[in-house]
Image (cartoon, grey):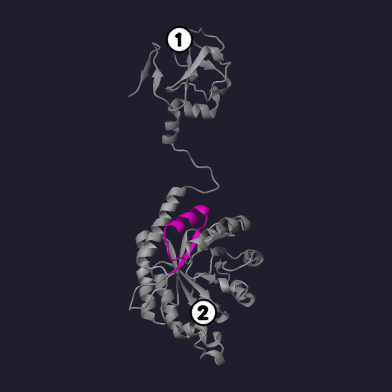
Amino acid sequence: MAIDIFEDLFVLELANNHWGKLERGLKIVDDFAAVVKRNGVRASIKLQFRNVDEFIHREYRDCDDVRYIKKTLSTQMPWDELRAMVERVRGHGMVAMVTPFDEVSVDKCVEFGVDFLKIASSDIRDKTLLRKIASTGLPVVASSGGADTHHLDALVDYFVSRRIPFALNHCVSIYPSEDSELELNQIDYLKARYPGVTIGLSTHEHRDWHDSLLIAYAKGARTFERHIDIDYEGVPVSAYCTRPEQADVWFKAFKKAKEMCGGPAMAKRVVPAKEREYLDGLVRGVYVKRDLPAGHVLTDEDVFLAVPLLKGQISTREFESGEVLKTPLAADEPVLLGDIDAHYVSDPEVLRLVPDRGMAWRLPDMTVVVNQ
């Protein structure tokens, strides 16, 4: 299953912060696109689709005391304007992504050429909607807010078994979330439980745009989601929403986390030459205590160990006692690799490391020159 399409993807959740106004929605897209471009990150701006005429029961459309109904009606946009927003997102080179909350909205996502679909935490057990989403074959990201483990097991199995590219976000559905409510250790839990599935973080905290990213990335989260909004026309910005300047901090924290974490988590890093050279400078070299003839078998009593480790000299890493001298050595001289007959003289690691380390070569007159 292809999972790399989710790698290092930022999902910027516009939600209903357009407040039903195309101009405002396009400005949010444009303002965040500029921050995305400046930071050179891969991002999506995600919209929410609802077929409002059917989504809300006709006999309950006047229920002002039900916040969800009231906000859905007050932020309703016609399909052609939602299409325009999708096209603006794509025009900025970003991934077009939508959370569809009903089956008609899924069809509109396909019609508009949306790239990814999102399943909200509230809908991960909505079997009708899940079947419809799966029928598109589009990549899917789901949030885990409020879910029990057996619900997540069923969700993951449903999409993975159908070979639909799928990512799962750890999510705490508390708006806004305090730092103490983030439960970032759940990233470890999800990664262990669902190997092969990209795990991300969908977060709604309102106090930090830096540290949580560093921690989440280090734990293995590879897709990241936040709600976004702008200061515009005096409309209050919700505490859990991220402004463009805060997204800038967020993206820079990602770059720093990536720099500090280095290569793939499951691969041994390549040790740089400067690190090897530094450590070689701390290793003791092998020197002879007294004059020794060719053919002598070295023992622990014949040598002493001291710094510096000279270029071409054997060290305590190799010396085993039992090496045979091929040439006579004078007291206090270093034992070089070419001076001995030992099984490790043809060891590729020894041959690779010994010639490049240290400080000097012994010249033919048996003196030692330390290179400055």
Q: Position of residue 349 (x, y in %)?
A: 52, 30
The relative height of residue 322 versus residue 181 in the rendered view (above or below) is: above
Which residue ends up furthest to the bottom in the rendered image? 59
The residue identified by callout 1 is 331
Specify whether residue 141 is painted magenta.
no
The relative height of residue 217 versus residue 11 in the rendered view (above or below) is: above
Specify whether residue 213 is painted magenta.
yes
The segment highlighted magenta reads: 205-227
Q: Quadrant of the N terminus?
A: bottom right
Q: Quadrant of the C terminus?
A: top left
Q: Secondary structure at mark 2?
A: helix
Q: Which mark is residue 175?
A: none
Q: Kindly identify the amino acid type of the residue bearing the numbered disc 2.
A: Lys
The residue identified by callout 2 is 108
Few, some or many residues within 10 Å of mark 1 (<14, 14–19, 20+): few
Q: Kindly identify the amino acid type of the residue bearing the numbered disc 1.
A: Ala
For the question of whether residue 345 can be seen, the reply is yes
Q: Position of residue 252 (x, y in %)?
A: 39, 57
Residue 147 occupies quadrant? bottom right
